[in-house]
Image (cartoon, rainbow, N blue to C red):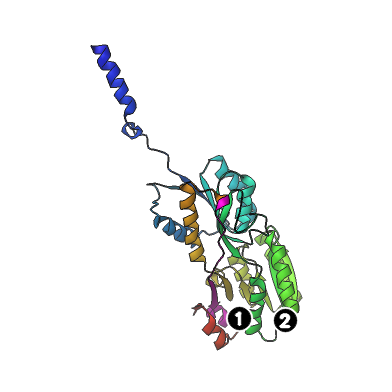
Amino acid sequence: MRRRASIAFTGCAALLPLAAFGQQPRLPRIGVLVPSNPEPFFSVFRQGLSEHGYVEGKNIQFEFRSADGKPERLPGLAQELVRIEVDIIVVWTGLAALAARQASTKIPIVMASAADPVGMGLVASLAHPGGNITGMSSTGSELGPKLLEFIRALLPGVRRVAVLANALDPFARTLVREVELGGRALGIAIQPIEVRTVDDYDAAFGAMKKERADAVIVQGSLPRKAAVDMALRQRLPAVSHNGLFAKEGGLLSYAPNQSEQFRRAANYIDRILKGARPGDLPVEQPTQFDLIINLQTAKAIGITVPRELRVRADHVIE
């Protein structure tokens, strides 16, 4: 009788949930890989996930990795996320996407924003990405000529514009090529300058000064704050296709609405966690672009922003 009771108890114990013994089910882990300051990306992205019912610590976890403005660190950080076996990696910028793809061709990768993912070889096509990557495209190359037009509106007599390009980012070649085409159409000489780290900025801005550049286009994947500070010291108008650039002290930025992109990236996470394959989810392109002008910076470097340009701006920082 006792033996039978013991067997019965053992059988019931086997049916008890693991939580009864203090063991919690494993929560999905999302690896987050960014090149520098994660805000506002992470806050907006996390809010987007909450709209799908995901709460950190309750039904989802994050493993956060930032290169702290040193893009050369991204490959190593991506490999860390792969080693700890995260379920999905979400990346901000094409350079982070490249690092993640080099680290894994199996773990799903979601681009919160990446310039020209087809041209960079990240996906086969926007409609049919294939592989393990999908998400949001920020376009990019066509924004270079548009930035030249804004520079011409700010500086009618502009003759030479420098392009501060990221040597670590394959998109740099496309950006420079498109800006040079735009420069020929507008009669503006283009001075491409490649940098690898912030340590190269002194020489780069020295070259701009020597060649008497009237303005500079800063590639969006470069560390922004250091470029902004250097441009301010030289009283050099600096613009970018990164929406945060003007908010951090640059003169002007023209870029996709980043908050919308970051929120939409959360939708991809939700669909993948529910069983969708990244390669079957089309890459979305931005539909809304924001022109942001920093009037404080304009005043600091002695530029008067035309009224018609201020009226066109989506955001004016005063």
Helix, strand or loop at disc 2? helix
Q: Position of residue 199 (x, y in %)?
A: 67, 61
How many numbered discs sit on the rendered protein?
Answer: 2
For image coordinates 31% across by 30% down, the residue present is: 16
Q: Position of residue 100 (x, y in %)?
A: 60, 49
**The quadrant where residue 233 appears:** bottom right
* Label 2 packing within 10 angstroms: few (<14), some (14-19), many (20+): some
* Label 1 packing within 10 angstroms: few (<14), some (14-19), many (20+): some
Please indicate whether residue 203 sits to the left or right of residue 270 in the image.
right
Label 2, label 1: how far apart the Cα atoms are: 24 Å
> According to the image, label 1 marks what residue?
301
Q: Position of residue 166 (x, y in %)?
A: 68, 62
For image coordinates 34% across by 25% down, the residue present is: 14
Q: Quadrant of the N terminus?
A: top left
Q: In this orientation, which residue lies closer to the viewer: 245 or 53?
A: 53
Compare marks 2 and 1 and give the one earlier in the sequence: 2
Q: Which mark is residue 87?
A: none
Q: In this orientation, which residue lies closer to the viewer: 207 or 263?
A: 263
Question: What amino acid is found at the position of numbered circle 1 in the picture?
Answer: Ile
Quick check: can you spot residue 45?
A: yes
> According to the image, label 2 marks what residue?
186
**The quadrant where residue 177 appears:** bottom right
Depicted 29 relative to depicted 208: above or below = above
Depicted 148 relative to depicted 112: above or below = below
Query: Which numbered mark, 2 or 1, is in the foreground of this view?
Result: 2
Helix, strand or loop at disc 1? loop
Magenta span: 279-299
For image coordinates 59% across by 43% down, the residue present is: 106
Residue 197 colored magenta? no
Q: Position of residue 152 (x, y in %)?
A: 66, 82
Quick check: can you spot residue 39?
A: no
Question: What amino acid is found at the position of numbered circle 2 in the picture?
Answer: Leu
